[in-house]
Amino acid sequence: MQGADRTTADRRTVLKLSGVAGAASLTGIAGCLDDGAVDDADELVITQGEFIENPDPNDHITGPYFNVLDPVYEPLFDVTPEFEFQPRVVDDWEDMGDGTAELTIRDDVVFHNGDDLTAEDVAYTFNRMIDPELGVESDQAAGLGAIDGAEALDETTVSLEHNVAPSLAEYEYANYGRAVNQEWIEGQDQPIAGSDADAFNGTGPFEVVEYEPDVQLVLEPFDDYWGEVPDFDRVTFNADGESSGRANALQAGESDIVDNVIPEDVSTVDEADGVEIRNETSLRNVFLVMKSGVEPFDSQEFRQAMNYAVDNEGIIDSVLGGFADPMTQPIPEGVFGFNPDLDPYSQDIERAEELVEESGYAGAEITLHAPEGRYLNDADVAQTAADHIDQLENVDCDIDIVPFPDISDANSAGYDDENMPFFLIGWGVITGDSDYGLAPFFTEEAALETLRNEDISEAILESQEVEDEDEREQLLQDINEELREEAPWVFLHSQDSVYGVRDDLEWEPRTDESIYLWDIN
Amino acid sequence: MSFGKFLLKRSLQGLVVIWGVVTVLFGLRAITPGDPVNLIVDPAVDQATRDRIREELGLDQPIYVQYVDYLQDLLVGDLGYSYQSSRPVTTMVLERVPATLELAVAATVIALVIAIPLGVISGTRRNEPADYGATSFSLVGISTPNFWLGIMLILLLAVQIDIFPTGRRPVAFHDALWTFLTTFYVGDLLTWLHHIILPAVTLGTYFTALITRLTRSGMLDEYGKPYVTATEAKGIPGVLIRYKHVLRNTMIPIITVLGLQFGTLLGGAVVTETVFSWPGLGLRLIDGINNLDWPLIQGIIIFIGISYVVINIAVDAIYAKLNPRVIDE
C-alpha cells in the first residue's frame, strides 16, 4: 500500500501541483514572450511626449508633429542645423526679384499611392496652408505670413508670390512645405482626420503600415522612393506623455530615443547601462512679459530693474539642472539676426533698486502670473524669479499660478491690457529667422503686441523688405540690441531639448528639435 | 410595485443623473478660463481669423443657445469634434472603449480569482495565521495608491528584472482572439496577456482587497446564523456547508459590489492607463485635459457617466430579481 500511496495523488496534492505548474507557466510566458524590447538592429523606436494631433501634414506646427510626419511627408527642402537650405524635393529655387520665387521640383517623386508629384500638387500645398477656404485652418499660416499664393507654371515649376525680402520669404517657404497630393486630399475629410494607415499619402522614404491615433505610428521603407532610404526596416513612433514612462521604456530597451527627459529623470537615465542623455539648446525661449502700456511696466527703467533683480544663471543651475542657456535678447542663438555681441543681464540688486527709484515706481506691488507644466519646471522658475524681485527693498512681488489658457489669453490681449500685465510664457522661433520672434510681439497692432515702440516697430517692418541679406542681418541685430535695452521682457533662458538615447546610436540633437530619420545611424 | 415599474423608475432616475452630468460639465466648460480659439490655432493668427473660427464653432452665440445646441446634438449621439485632432469625439470615445473594458475585466477576474478563495480561507480560519495573512494583505491592498504600485511594478518587473513590458497594448484582445480562432496562432493572445498582467494587477489590487474583506466578513456573518448550526446538526459535511450554503449567501452582496465597482473601474482606470500607457479612455481623458480639449473631455466623462448609470440599473435589476423585497423598499 505504501507504493500505492506514492503514486496516487490526492486532491490537495493535485491542487498544489497545479499551483506550482501555473506559476511556472506564467514565469515561462513572461520569460519567453516579446516584452516589447527592441531586439532588431534594423528597427528603430522613438518615443515622444507629444504626438501628431491628426495625420494632416498641413494642419499643425509643433516639432513632435513634424518629427512623426516628416518620414512620410518629407520636407520640400533639407534644412541644416545651421538653417541653411539644401535641395530635396525642390531641386532648385530662385527669387525672381519681382515679388515671386520659382521652385523647380524633381520629376521622379512619387506618392505612396503611386501618383506622380506635380507642380500643381506643390502649389496646392502652399495654398492649402494659407487659405482656409481650402479646408484647413492651418497653424502654419502664421509662419507663412509673407506668402500670398502659389501657382504651377509647368509640370515641375512652381511660382510663389510673396510680399517681403527674398531671404525672409525663403525662410518661410523652405520651412513649411510638405507636399500633398491634391487629387487624393480633395477626397478626404478636411483636415485629414483618419485613424488608420490609409489616412497617409506622402512622398517620403517611409510609408505608414500601422496607425493608432495618439498611440503609435509604424513605418516601413517605401520601395519607389526617389532617393536613398534610411537604413531601417521598420520605424515606430510611440506616444507617452509621462517623462518617467519614457525613461522606463528607454532603460527597458523598448525605445531607442525618448524626448523631453525632465531634470528629475536625467540622473536615472544617465546612470543606466546602455543609454545616455544628449541635449542641445533649443529655439524655445522662456521669458517674463511686461506689458509696456501698463504701470509700472511703462517705465523702461522699471523693466530693466526687473532684469537686474533676477539671478538668471542661478535659476538655470538650481531649477533647470543646467539644461538651459541665459537669454541675451528676444531671439535665441542660432537664429538669423541674433546679435552675438550682447551679454545677458546679471543679477545686481543695488542697480535694480536704483533703477526702480529712477522709474518713480518705488513701492510698486506687482504679481507675476505663471502656468504650471507647460514649460520645463515653469512654476518653479517663476516662483524663484518672483522671490528674487521680492528681495528688492522697493518692490513687492507675489506669484499666482494660473491655467495656461489664462496666460495665452493675456498674451493676445494687447500691450495695454491691465488684467494680467506680467506673466511667464515661452516662444519658439521655429522658422530660424528673427522676424518670427520679433514681429508678433513688437510691431504695432500685432497679435501678441507687448511693447509699443514706434521706432522698433518700423524697423522690424523695414527689415522685412530689405533684400540684401547682410544688410538685413545687421538691421535685425541692431533691433535685437535695442530691444535688450528696452527690456520688454525679463529675459530668462533658452530651454534645452533633453533626450535619452541608446548609447550606440549615432545621432545628435538639433537646435530646431527635429529628429530626422536620415540623420540617424 | 411591479418589476417593470421598478425598472422604469430606475431608468428615469438614471436619465436625470445623466442630464445632471451633462449640465454640470457644460457649466464647467463655460466658466473655465481660456479662449477655445487659442487652443485651435496658433496664437499669432490675426483677429479676423479668430472671429471666423469663433463663429463657425457657435462660440459667438449666447451660452443658453450653445447649451440647447449641445443637448440637441447629444440626443443624436453627436458629441462634436475634437479641438486638437478635428476628429469626431464619438469615434474617439468608442475606439478607446475596448482597451478600457479589457483592463477592467482583467482586473475583475484577477480580483475574483484571488479574493474569493482568500476571503473564504480567512473567514473559515478566523484568528489563525492564514486569516492574519489575508487580512494583512487586504489592508495593504486597500491602502496602496495604485499609481505608486504601478510605478513600483514597472521598476521592479520591467526595468530591473525585465520579465514584463513597461506598458502599452501592442494587440487588441478581440484581434488576438480572432487570430487564434481563425489560424490557431496563440502568440498574439499570449502577447496581449503579457502586456495586460501588470496594469490589471495594479488596477485590481484595491478591488481584490475589498472583495477579500467582504468575503471574509460575509462568511463570518453567515457562520453565525442558525441555519448553519442546523445543517451541521444534520451531519452535512463542512465543505458542503462552506461552499453550498455559506459562500452562496455571501455572494449576494459581493455581486452588488462587483457591479458597482466595475463602473468605478471603467472611470478609475485613468491613473493605471496613464502609468502603463494603456490606450484606453482614461489615457485619452488625460490627453484631453492636458490640451483643454473640452469636447473630448465632455464626451469621455459623459460616456463614463452613462456606463456607470447603466451598470447600476443592471445591478439593481439583478438584485431585484434575486431579492424582490427591494422593489417595495
Image (spheres, coloured by chain):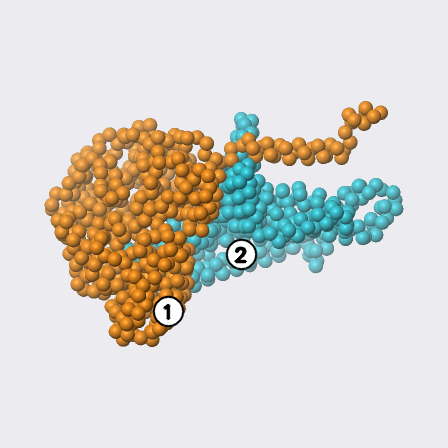
Chain colours: A orange, B cyan
Quadrant where the image shows the N terminus of chain A: top right
Q: Amino acid at mark 2?
A: Ile
In screen coordinates, is A152 left or right of A502? left
User: Dividing the image into 4 quarters, which one contains the C terminus of chain A?
Assistant: top left
Mark 2 Cα shell of 10 Å, populated few (<14), some (14-19), many (≥20): many
Q: Residue at x 19, y 54 (%)?
A: A476
What residue sits 30% from the left and 60% below the top? A491
Q: Which residue is mark 1?
A: A391
| Same subunit: marks 2 and 1 | no
Farthest residue, direction left: A97
How far from the left and from the top, in percent, is residue A232? 37, 31
Would you say A198 lies left or right of B75 here?
left
Q: Is residue B234 left or right of residue B33?
A: right
The amino acid type of the residue labelled 1 equals: Gln
> Is there CB contact under 8 Å for labels 2 and 1?
no
Q: Chain of mark 2?
A: B
Location of residue B312 in the rendering, given as x and y in whole percent from the top left corner: 61, 52
Location of mark 2 (residue): B18
Q: Is residue A205 above or below residue B230?
A: above
Query: What residue sits 68% from the left and 35% below the top?
Result: A19
Please identify, in this view, whether the residue under mark 2 or under mark 1 is nearer the observer. 1
Label 1 is found on which chain of the structure? A
Which residue sits at x=42%, y=50%? A262
Q: Position of residue B296 (x, y in %)?
A: 44, 51
